[in-house]
Amino acid sequence: MKTFTDCLPCFLRQAIQAARLSGAGEEGQRKIADAAEEFLKTVKLSDSPPMISRNMHVIIRKMLDDPDPYRKVKDKYNRLAMSMYPFLKEKVRNSRDPLLTAVRTAIAGNVIDFGSQLEFELDSDVNDVLTKEFAVFDYEALKESLAAERDILYLGDNTGETVFDRVLIEEIIGRFGSRIKYAVKEGPIINDATREDAVFAGLDKVAEIVSTGCNSPGIVLEYCSGEFLELYKNSRLIISKGQGNFETLNAEKRPIYFLFKIKCDVVAAFTGLKNGSILIKKN
Amino acid sequence: MKTFTDCLPCFLRQAIQAARLSGAGEEGQRKIADAAEEFLKTVKLSDSPPMISRNMHVIIRKMLDDPDPYRKVKDKYNRLAMSMYPFLKEKVRNSRDPLLTAVRTAIAGNVIDFGSQLEFELDSDVNDVLTKEFAVFDYEALKESLAAERDILYLGDNTGETVFDRVLIEEIIGRFGSRIKYAVKEGPIINDATREDAVFAGLDKVAEIVSTGCNSPGIVLEYCSGEFLELYKNSRLIISKGQGNFETLNAEKRPIYFLFKIKCDVVAAFTGLKNGSILIKKN
């Protein structure tokens, strides 16, 4: 997906947020904002929002001299998400369709996204996603693909969301005996999950953790490692979590199922769906 | 109120919105965005948000070669608001405390604000304000002041909101026989009401319409005419509508009652109240 002019204020908001989370006061935040304003004049709208976001954060982290401004909040939500793990497993176990509830759970974990919004009520947002209607519901196709393909490339998204992904991955393995590779970011970018976050969520116990080889939100193929691109090209079933991955892979001709919640008006307009919609979307 | 770093993305959003409303395509919107980004690097956070917004829009209007980008939407909401006038009058007439309902009505009209948000459900937003609890409720003091002071300076805010102000003004005149001067902007700025908008709402039939002498949102005293400043300084009872007027006059030592709904997280944090709160706040 290309970038739209309405994304520009959102990039600037993100820059100021990163500065604040890094501990910068008003003056420091202003310095970062001015740098972001300068940067935004140079971006190509034909690039995807995650690509632009990544390049902006490279500049910001250098200016802040902070390799990971979101570390503290990531740790906070890692712990919060882990504390919900038993509850989420129970929800799945007690539901009429455990796989569907696990899918809903994985999408619910996607509400943990500081890129779109820092503040949210985790439990209420999760319950909202666990009960609301799907705007796109390619669930039957997903089940058929899961039954047909043993090897799955699972594209992770945010820190904390990793715990929710684990619930879905455990359900998939239990039901289909799948072998799963879970892709994380090579380095910190906003609150995206890196290897240490995936390990914190216990994903290394149920999946092979692989790196995209790059530190952009979403999956910016131009920035990924050759090793990851090989894996991506040869995967016959890909589960993609989150809006960022959709923004970068929506035009791809690969067997991808996008599981995510629409979090901004730009993607809502792009898909023709309401902001807040939840999707199981087959490519 | 000073400007906060979190206001910067909002200014940029406003700039792009103005370009779109003026009919600019993506390229045109981008040009305006880049100019706004350049401008934002120069602003002083010690200035109030309306002052900065005004100066930005001066640049934007020149670039767009459009003296009034919001004209079409202002006309639309003028008509929409006028169509609600009979309903609003009925609500007030049938209520237990008509003056309070009229005050609520005037605040409800304040939901019409393209500065903070372009899209809103007028009827549902209005009903929300007509029923919700006040976060600050200096209503008794307001009634005493209305009984004591016959001459009132009423600081208008947005187009369409003017119709809702008329309902309150008519209620005040009917109950206290007040003489009211209704202040509008000298020239177009975002969707703020100018003389023609006040006349469209029929305010000239119940009040004397005066100009602030400037074209900024809120009341930026540095930009107002000497004539208006005289009137302002000599007024012993001032009713100020909307968040913009609060942002520019909150520190003033004048007999002002602020009637507004908090529309952004910055003002929410500044006042220590929730975003969406409604206030009758005595200075």
Image (cartoon, coloured by chain):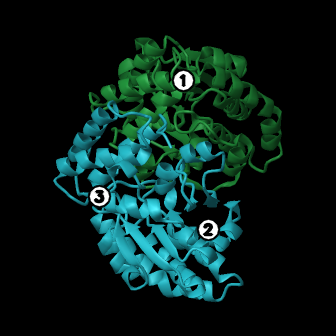
Chain colours: A green, B cyan
Q: Residues within 10 Å of mark 3 (few under 14, many from 20)?
A: some
Q: Quadrant of the N terminus of chain A?
A: top left
- CA gap, disc 1 to disc 3? 35 Å
Q: Are marks 1 and 2 in contact (CB under 8 Å)?
A: no
The tag on residue A12 is: none
Residues marked 3 and 2, same chain: yes
Q: Amino acid at mark 2?
A: Val
Provide the secondary structure element on which disc 3 rests: helix
Residue A34 vs B164, above or below: the answer is above
Q: Which residue is mark 1?
A: A25
Give the percent coordinates (x, y) of residue A224.
42, 18
Q: Residues within 10 Å of mark 1 (few under 14, many from 20)?
A: few
Provide the secondary structure element on which disc 2 rests: helix
Give the percent coordinates (x, y) of residue B236.
53, 66
Question: Pointer 3 indicates a residue of which chain?
Answer: B
Residue A270 vs A248, above or below: the answer is below
Q: Nearer the viewer, mark 3 or mark 2?
A: 2
Q: Quadrant of the C terminus of chain A?
A: top left
Q: Nearer the viewer, mark 1 or mark 3?
A: 1
Tell me if residue A266 can be seen: yes
Q: Which residue is mark 3?
A: B21
Marked residue nearer the N-terminal end (3 or 2): 3
Q: Residue furthest left?
A: B65
Most foreground residue, B209 or A191 = B209
Please tell me in which quadrant of the rendered image residue B37 appears.
top left
